[in-house]
């Protein structure tokens, strides 16, 4: 961490993460898929703004906090809705923005599998994430 080479390599990893996320979202949208977000954390918002992701890629995001619902993510202006909206709109993909909570969120929201929905995490690699079978009820 004490050399410029370290930070140059880190910069390239960050850029590649952006490219992979945008590639996933572009391909999903070109295939006619609905993509929404789960959560409105600061780190997720930073990622969306860095990548230039707006409502052209994410229709909306949801958050359990009533203080966030009815507002918009700063910069991207993506609407923040109540989690019930996911049941109403039945998206193909749910992008988990607090990716460190992927297991808990996917267990809470595992009903998306009823219509073939899937969870996606953006970090450290874009990955379609599934609830482990042993915790599915």
Image (cartoon, rainbow, N blue to C red):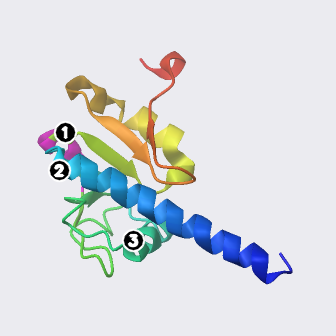
Residue 65: where, in percent of width, then height? Answer: 36, 61
Which badge, 1 or 3, comes first in the chain's sequence? 3
Q: Closer to the camera, 27 or 124? A: 27
Distance of label 1 from label 3 (alpha carbons): 27 Å
User: Which label sits on residue 127?
Assistant: none
Tag 2 and tag 3, C-beta contact below 8 Å = no
Which residue corresponds to the image point at 41% horizontal and 17% vertical from the top-left? Answer: 137
Q: Closer to the camera, 109 or 127? A: 127
Which residue corresponds to the image point at 13% horizontal and 44% vertical from the top-left? Answer: 89
- Under circle 3, the secondary element is helix
Residue 44: where, in percent of width, then height? Answer: 45, 65
For the question of whether residue 58 can be seen, the reply is yes
Q: Residues within 10 Å of mark 2 (few under 14, many from 20)?
A: few
Compared to residue 135, the image places residue 118 above or below, namely below
Specify start and end residues of the magenta stretch as a single range: 82-89
Residue 57: where, in percent of width, then height? Answer: 24, 60
Of marks 2 and 1, the one in the foreground: 2
Distance of label 2 from label 3 (alpha carbons): 18 Å
Distance of label 2 from label 1 (alpha carbons): 23 Å
User: Magenta includes 53?
Assistant: no
- Mark 1 highlights which residue? 87
Residue 104: where, in percent of width, then height? Answer: 50, 40
Compared to residue 127, the image places residue 55 above or below, namely below
- Under circle 2, the secondary element is helix
Q: Which quadrant holds residue 76?
A: bottom left
Residue 13 located left or right of residue 61: right
User: Which label sits on residue 30?
Assistant: 2
């Amino acid at each position: 961490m004490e050399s410029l080479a370290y930070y140059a390599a880190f910069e390239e990893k960050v850029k590649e993460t952006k490219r992979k996320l945008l590639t996933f979202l572009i391909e999903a949208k070109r295939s006619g898929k609905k993509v929404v977000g789960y959560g409105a954390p600061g780190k997720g918002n930073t990622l969306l703004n860095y990548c230039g992701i707006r409502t052209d890629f994410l229709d909306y995001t949801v958050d359990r906090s009533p203080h966030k619902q009815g507002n918009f993510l700063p910069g991207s202006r993506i609407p923040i809705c109540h989690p019930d909206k996911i049941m109403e709109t039945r998206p193909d993909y749910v992008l988990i923005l607090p990716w460190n909570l992927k297991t808990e969120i996917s267990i809470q929201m595992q009903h998306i599998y009823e219509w073939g929905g899937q969870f996606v995490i953006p970090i450290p690699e874009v990955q379609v994430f599934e609830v482990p079978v042993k915790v599915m009820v």
